[in-house]
């Protein structure tokens, strides 16, 4: 059934009861798996993903043969991209990203293999964003493996994967410049309608993504520096700026939510005596 966007005014509600600039419910946990170096679980609406980070560690035999510093996981396209990035970074850690989509995660129950082009594109996008943010030069001749598992899909999949990866890397204690937080933004009118006065929307679900043009944007920290920008929809240039502004503002909201989760976990670990309390840590958690 086509999505009726006639009620998508700035003063009215969307199909799921949200206003145009409202995020869906975001729930996240870190350190969900004791055996992993870093792990996280994240929900954005009904999109649910898990992330496990291993390393920095010595590269395995298969990874050494591949020779991809910062390479994605699975597929010739990912390996080629990793090889290009790794040419000048032999003394830095390599980043391997693997995305596994469960067959039951979507309504169509389509099973996606490792060579699926859509999965390869997401792996390369995440890997490139991490390569520019992580301080990989501190871990020469080692590998950081990021394994992502998609349990349920309801829109904003790439954004959820990026946010879950950020939490897992923080849990693993890998130095980075700042949080990378992502969100989607769309428009209330399709490209064919040619409505230049269409309103922007924040954090689209699956039904909205199927009918409306949208983009995924990720920013670095609380700034306007864009780390990832993916737009696969046809959209008028006049609408693009408004969509980008709304998306960047959504990234700031997500960043504050993730930062609160990290601080709450840090405070809990201090109270339980898992880590030693220091003056610097105390000031950071109380800010």
Image (cartoon, rainbow, N blue to C red):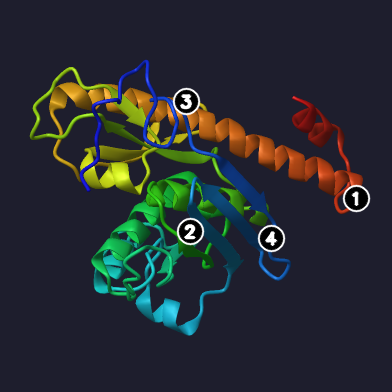
Q: Nearer the viewer, mark 3 or mark 4?
A: 4
Q: Is residue 173 left or right of residue 209?
A: right
The residue pinned by badge 1 equals: 272
Q: Nearer the viewer, residue 222 or 240?
A: 240
Q: Position of residue 62 (x, y in %)?
A: 43, 82
- Residue 223: which numbered mark, if any? 3
- Residue 92: which numbered mark, if any? 2
Q: Is residue 192 left or right of residue 263?
A: left
Query: Would residue 215 be visible to someone looking at this image?
Result: yes
Q: Position of residue 102 (x, y in %)?
A: 43, 70
Q: Quadrant of residue 282?
A: top right
Label 4, label 2: how far apart the Cα atoms are? 28 Å
- Residue 215: which numbered mark, if any? none
Label 1, label 4: how far apart the Cα atoms are? 16 Å
Disc 4 secondary structure class: loop
Q: Earlier in the sequence, mark 3 or mark 4?
A: 4
Disc 1 secondary structure class: loop
Q: Residue furthest front?
A: 1
Disc 2 secondary structure class: loop
Crowdedness near tag 1: few (<14), some (14–19) or many (≥20) residues, C-alpha within 10 Å: few
Label 2, label 1: how far apart the Cα atoms are? 35 Å
Residue beneath the point at 37% across and 30% down = 14
Q: Quadrant of the C terminus?
A: top right
Query: Would residue 173 be visible to someone looking at this image?
Result: no
The residue pinned by badge 4 equals: 32
Q: Nearer the viewer, residue 190 or 271?
A: 190
């Amino acid at each position: 059934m086509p999505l009726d966007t006639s009620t998508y005014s700035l003063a009215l509600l969307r199909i799921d009861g949200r206003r145009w600039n409202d995020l869906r419910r975001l729930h996240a946990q870190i350190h969900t798996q004791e055996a992993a170096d870093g792990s996280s679980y994240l929900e954005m609406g009904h999109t649910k993903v898990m992330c496990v980070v291993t390393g920095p560690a010595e590269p395995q035999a298969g990874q050494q043969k591949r020779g991809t510093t910062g390479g994605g996981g699975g597929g010739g396209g990912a390996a080629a991209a990793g090889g290009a990035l790794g040419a000048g970074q032999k003394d830095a850690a390599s980043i391997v990203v693997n995305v596994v989509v469960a067959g039951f995660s979507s309504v169509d129950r389509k099973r996606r293999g490792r060579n699926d082009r859509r999965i390869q594109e997401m792996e390369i996008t995440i890997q490139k964003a991490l390569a520019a943010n992580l301080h990989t030069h501190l871990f020469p001749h080692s590998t950081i493996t990021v394994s992502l598992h998609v349990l349920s899909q309801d829109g904003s999949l790439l954004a959820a994967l990026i946010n879950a990866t950020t939490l897992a890397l923080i849990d693993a204690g890998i130095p980075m410049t700042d949080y990378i937080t992502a969100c989607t933004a769309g428009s209330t009118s399709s490209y064919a309608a040619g409505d230049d006065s269409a309103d922007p929307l924040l954090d689209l679900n699956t039904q909205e993504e199927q009918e409306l043009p949208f983009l995924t944007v990720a920013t670095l920290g609380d700034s306007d520096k864009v780390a990832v920008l993916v737009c696969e929809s046809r959209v008028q240039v006049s609408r693009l700026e408004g969509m980008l502004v709304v998306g960047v503002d959504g990234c700031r909201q997500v960043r504050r939510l993730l930062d609160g989760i990290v601080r709450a976990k840090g405070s809990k670990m201090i109270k339980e005596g898992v880590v030693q309390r220091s003056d610097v840590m105390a000031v950071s958690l109380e800010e």
